[in-house]
């Protein structure tokens, strides 16, 4: 069993207690991770505070910092085979996915933020006077706490750490206790780059204690959180204690809207990926599938047929489409929602049960549902799809927007004017037209409504990790006296 340690002030360390890391496909304990205490957390915060205040990182030029980001990216690629294996065993995601998505995307994100000097440049502000000049400087926020969920640990770590570091901040990072292994492995890669002590600290343990401390602690200047809307609300409240900057990437219940002028087989493929990839444990899962009435029966028939043919099982087999849920608790939550759906009168079209074998497996499940049912309104975070029928564009938009969330949507139509018109009326942060799930570092990512505030990725995120300073400079020889009180 590999030994995993936390990383505080440039040192690898244990905590008094440990937490078992479980492979959800086999139910075996594959590692033990440190269970940090509040004192460990405060030590990590102080390490980041001292590193930031000393200027060992923030005083570097961007070009100096970018060398480290590049080295981290290279380190991830050099260790790709270990990371791919760890990520799959720790989370249950398919090896196909960790190979082609999680690890390369994480490496590319560090690489991207090593090439964005222009986002940090100072600016001259154009004024309506010539008696003064004004300059805008962008400076790091300070100590940033970052908390992530378990569904995409390496990608989330990269999305959070890379822009924050590029901007000159120092970090205390906490992954989910259910999936910490790849992030602790990343600590070794970061350490090898020679990054100054305290610039990145990685602690593991329970969110309700150490995550709570990170969001309350007065020495933390900003908190960047990805996770559920309920915990996001708590974090926002805690952050008010010292007016921390917050960036929240929260839950979703995204609509996948299919108009009748589409190729059914292609779109069925898109709809399957949108709900069953990562076992449906995706914030942007297309968990509400809205189909135009003219093609509804045929579309649903083919969708159910293909769902029944999905290969669910050993996640280390490259032919597998779906692995297990992350944990027993998550599996039980999903099964409970399936029961709720049945009680609400939703019609079960396929799936609906746990799979009787080792591991936390649930059958890919489809319900014909109504949008006001709990299974269509609450985030299940599992392989459960609600299909619904619509008559026209107006009704599709109304159903799609009828949710407290606003993370993503998909629109399928050969008429691009139609698709764009619909996209503009959807109240959510990203919309894919005739595709699903593309993410590029250049484009901002984030939610509307209760799906969050702030944007990750692209320029927006690095700007969120910076604060703006305006400096005024008089251009007159004599000190001007614009004061009302002389
Ligand atoms: P979660 O329960 O909200 O937990 C997320 C993180 O917060 C974990 O590290 C957790 O620690 C920690 N935490 C728990 N209680 C806390 C507290 N009181 N104070 C501070 N931190 C606390 O979410 P999850 O179940 O891990 O992940 C699923 C959720 O993430 C879904 O709602 C999904 O939509 C959302 N998500 C959103 C995005 C996005 O970009 N919008 C992306 C991915 C996932 P422990 O669990 O280790 O105790
Ligand atoms: Mg695990």
Image (cartoon, rainbow, N blue to C red):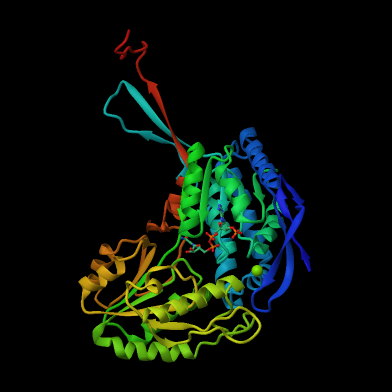
Q: Going 58% across and 49% down the picture, which residue do you hit?
A: 212
Place of residue 153 in the rendered image (x, y in percent of width and height, measured from the top left): 59, 63
Place of residue 424 in the rendered image (x, y in percent of width and height, measured from the top left): 26, 63
Q: Quadrant of the C terminus?
A: top left
Q: How many marks?
A: 0
Q: Quadrant of residue 394?
A: bottom left
Residue 271, can we see it? no
Q: Going 60% across and 67% down the picture, which residue do you hit?
A: 103
Q: Quadrant of the N terminus?
A: bottom right
The extreme front residue here reads 343
Query: Is residue 58 depicted above or below 17 in this figure?
Result: above
Query: Is residue 370 depicted above or below 186 in this figure?
Result: below
The front one of 305 and 365 is 365
The front one of 466 and 41 is 41
Q: Going 45% across and 65% down the picture, which residue do you hit?
A: 439
Place of residue 13 in the rendered image (x, y in percent of width and height, measured from the top left): 76, 51
Query: Is residue 61 depicted above or below 434 in this figure?
Result: above
Q: Would you say 181 lies left or right of 242 here?
A: right
Q: Going 38% across and 78% down the picture, which residue do you hit?
A: 344
The front one of 427 and 420 is 427
Residue 386, can we see it? yes
The front one of 166 and 25 is 25
């Amino acid at each position: 069993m590999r030994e995993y340690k936390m990383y505080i002030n440039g040192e690898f360390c244990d905590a008094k207690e440990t937490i078992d890391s479980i492979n959800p496909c086999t139910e075996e304990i594959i590692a033990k991770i440190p269970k940090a205490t509040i004192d460990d957390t405060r030590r990590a915060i102080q390490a980041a505070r001292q590193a930031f205040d000393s200027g060992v990182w923030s005083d570097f030029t961007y070009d100096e910092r970018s060398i480290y980001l590049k080295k981290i990216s290279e380190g991830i690629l050099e260790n790709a085979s270990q990371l791919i294996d760890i990520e799959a065993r720790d989370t249950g995601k398919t090896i196909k996915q960790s190979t082609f998505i999680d690890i390369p995307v994480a490496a590319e994100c560090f690489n991207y933020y090593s090439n964005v000097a222009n986002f940090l440049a100072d600016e001259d502000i154009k004024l309506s006077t010539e008696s003064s000049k004004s300059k805008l400087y962008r400076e790091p926020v300070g100590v940033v706490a970052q908390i992530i969920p378990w569904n995409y640990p390496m990608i989330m770590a990269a999305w959070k750490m890379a822009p924050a570091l590029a901007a000159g901040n120092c970090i205390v990072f906490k992954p989910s206790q259910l999936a910490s292994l790849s992030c602790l492995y990343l600590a070794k890669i970061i350490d090898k780059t020679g990054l100054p002590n305290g610039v990145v600290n990685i602690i593991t343990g329970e969110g309700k204690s150490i995550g709570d401390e990170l969001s309350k602690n007065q020495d933390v200047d900003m908190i960047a959180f990805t996770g559920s809307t309920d915990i996001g609300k708590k974090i926002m409240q805690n952050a008010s204690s010292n007016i921390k900057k917050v960036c929240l990437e929260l839950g979703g219940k995204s609509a996948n809207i299919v108009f009748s002028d589409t190729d059914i087989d292609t779109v069925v493929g898109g709809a399957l990926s949108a709900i069953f990839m990562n076992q449906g444990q995706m914030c942007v899962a297309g968990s509400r599938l809205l189909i135009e009435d003219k093609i509804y029966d045929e579309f649903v028939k083919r969708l159910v047929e293909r769902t029944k043919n999905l290969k669910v099982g050993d996640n280390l087999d490259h032919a597998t489409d779906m692995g297990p849920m992350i944990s027993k608790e998550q599996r039980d939550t999903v099964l409970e929602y399936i029961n709720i759906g049945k009680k609400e009168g939703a019609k079960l079209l396929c799936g609906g049960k746990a799979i009787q074998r080792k591991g936390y497996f649930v059958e890919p499940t489809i319900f014909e549902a109504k949008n006001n049912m709990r299974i269509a309104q609450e985030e299940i975070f599992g392989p459960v799809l609600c299909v619904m029928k619509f008559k026209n564009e107006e009704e599709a938009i109304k159903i799609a927007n009828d949710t407290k969330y606003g993370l993503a949507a998909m629109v399928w139509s050969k008429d691009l004017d139609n698709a764009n018109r619909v996209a503009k009326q959807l109240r959510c942060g990203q919309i894919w037209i005739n595709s699903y799930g593309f993410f590029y570092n250049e484009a901002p990512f984030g939610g509307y409504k209760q799906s969050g505030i702030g944007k990750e990725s692209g320029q927006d995120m690095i700007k969120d990790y910076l604060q703006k300073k305006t400096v005024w400079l008089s251009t007159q020889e004599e000190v001007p006296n614009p004061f009302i009180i002389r």
